Image (cartoon, rainbow, N blue to C red):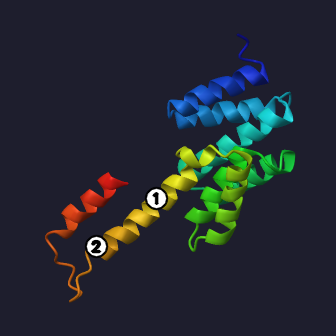
Amino acid sequence: VDPGRAQTTYNFARLEHEEEHLANAQELYEKALSLNTLSDTIRADALAYLGLIYQELHGDAETAGQCYSTALALDPEHPAALDFAAYLLLSQDPPDEERAASLHASVCRNDPYHADEPCPYHLLLARRLAMANRASLFEEEDGDGDDPGAYQELLARMDAS
């Protein structure tokens, strides 16, 4: 194993990312990209995952967006770059729901099984729906939100889904 090889460095970055050692993963992705010997496919992978780290760890939407754009310039149908870009658009204030849904639909068209797997876009969408459901559960007809059974109903709905 030669840690000076870009592919090996990228593989270590993925392992660190999977283990949620995001600062280490970021450093390794950046090192792998700087070696300039990655294939375009792996370069797009590294950029997409690096963008996700910038978005989630640093809250840096601009740099994340640049990473996704660069990855998509290498491969316009890159699944992770499309998926993470959709997540970025949905997480903005205000969210660009239409563009996010369009990008995510592209991912699902190219990979029909993607819709069955958790991804950042799905998780954020589910969180937003849960928040909306929670708000509606705690709204009574008189509007004071003081319904002792609402919390139990929320838990039952969450268990059912």
Instruction: Please determine whether, in this image, residue 10 is positioned above or below residue 119.
Output: above
Residue at the outermost bottom position: 142
Q: Pick whichever, 88 or 67, lies toward us.
A: 88
Q: Which residue is drawn at 46% across and 58% down?
A: 126
User: Along the horizontal axis of the image, is 98 left or right of 35?
Assistant: left
Label disc, if present, on residue 126 of the rendered structure:
1
Q: In the rendering, at what x and y percent does residue 108 appear?
A: 67, 51
* Residue 60 appears left or right of 130: right
- Occupied quadrant, residue 13: top right
* Position in image of residue 122 (x %, y %): 53, 54
Q: Where is residue 128 in the image (x, y as percent from the top left)?
A: 45, 65
Secondary structure of the residue carrying numbered label 1:
helix
Total numbered labels placed on residues in the image: 2
Residue, disc 2: 137
Instruction: Kindly indicate whether the residue at mark 1 contacts the one at mark 2 (C-beta within 8 angstroms).
Output: no
110 or 130, which is in the foreground? Answer: 110
Which residue is at a point 73% across and 55% down the rendered structure image? 106
> Alpha-carbon distance for marks 2 and 1?
16 Å
Crowd tier of the residue under label 1, counting other residues whose Cα lies within 10 Å: few below 14, some 14–19, many 20 or above: few
